[in-house]
């Protein structure tokens, strides 16, 4: 599965809802990544990088946009076309499978070798299983910060972070400010 630059660029220029969840756009001039439907001004083509998954965009150093909220993107129908192992793995990661076990143990549960699993992910998802799990934690937490009134410690736990410190460090690294400040700024 590969992404065609022009197809992706046309989709974001038209805010084409059919592509929502199929890919994400990393904008090199701002360092954020967006859904195709983002209401922000369409970035110049030379600033756009396209990724198959939120995990791949985050792995490349982009942080989730606060306007189009990549955590709310629908589960991509494109995944239906990929190998069953990948779909199963993504579903399990979504349920937190990689929050408390290694990729090696995880691969064993899926009945494949670790190297093969990594290869499948790099081909179909554009990011390693670990990167997908890391992105998932950030996206789940970000959704809860904005949409709930839950305390930060509880959010860290619910999103699968090992500690409140890991949670704080991750957000400080991404946004340059503590997670709680995202709640205030989104109001
Ligand atoms: Zn956006």
Image: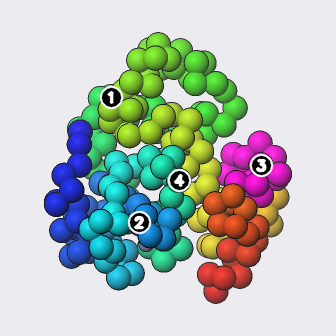
Query: Mark 2 highlights which residue?
Result: 27
The Cα atoms of the two marked residues, 3 and 1, are separated by 32 Å
**Taking 15 as reference, is 157 left or right?**
right
* SS under mark 4: loop
The Cα atoms of the two marked residues, 2 and 4, are separated by 10 Å
Q: Position of residue 87 (x, y in %)?
A: 37, 35
Q: Which of marks 2 and 1 is nearer the N terminus?
A: 2
Marking on residue 84: 1
Q: Earlier in the sequence, mark 3 or mark 2?
A: 2
Q: Where is residue 142 in the image (x, y as percent from the top left)?
A: 62, 64
The Cα atoms of the two marked residues, 4 and 3, are separated by 17 Å
Query: Mark 4 highlights which residue?
Result: 61
Q: How crowded is mark 2: few (under 14 residues within 10 Å), some or many (20 or more)?
A: many
Predominant SS of the magenta segment: helix
Using the image, determine if residue 136 lies above or below residue 34.
above
Q: Which residue is drawn at 65% across and 66% down?
A: 175
Q: Residue at x 83, y 51 (%)?
A: 165
Q: Which of marks 2 and 4 is nearer the N terminus?
A: 2
> Which quadrant is home to the C terminus?
bottom right
Segment tinted magenta in the rendering: 155-170
Using the image, determine if residue 20 lies above or below residue 112.
below
Marking on residue 174: none
Residue occupying the far bottom of the picture = 187
């Amino acid at each position: 599965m590969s992404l065609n630059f022009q197809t992706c660029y046309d989709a974001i220029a038209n805010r084409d809802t059919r592509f929502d969840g199929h890919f994400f756009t990393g904008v090199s001039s701002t360092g954020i990544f967006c859904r195709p439907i983002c209401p922000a001004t369409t970035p110049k083509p030379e600033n756009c990088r396209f990724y198959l998954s939120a995990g791949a965009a985050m792995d490349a150093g982009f942080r989730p946009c606060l306007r189009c909220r990549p955590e709310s993107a629908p589960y991509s129908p494109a995944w239906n076309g990929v190998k069953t192992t990948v779909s199963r793995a993504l579903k399990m990661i979504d349920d937190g499978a990689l929050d408390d076990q290694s990729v090696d143990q995880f691969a064993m549960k899926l009945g494949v070798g670790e190297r093969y699993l990594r290869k499948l992910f790099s081909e179909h998802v554009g990011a390693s299983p670990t990167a997908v799990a890391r992105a998932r934690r950030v996206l789940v937490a970000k959704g809860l910060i904005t949409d709930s009134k839950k305390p930060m410690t509880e959010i860290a736990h619910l999103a699968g972070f090992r500690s409140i410190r890991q949670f704080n460090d991750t957000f400080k690294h991404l946004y340059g400010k503590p997670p709680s400040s995202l709640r205030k700024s989104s109001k």
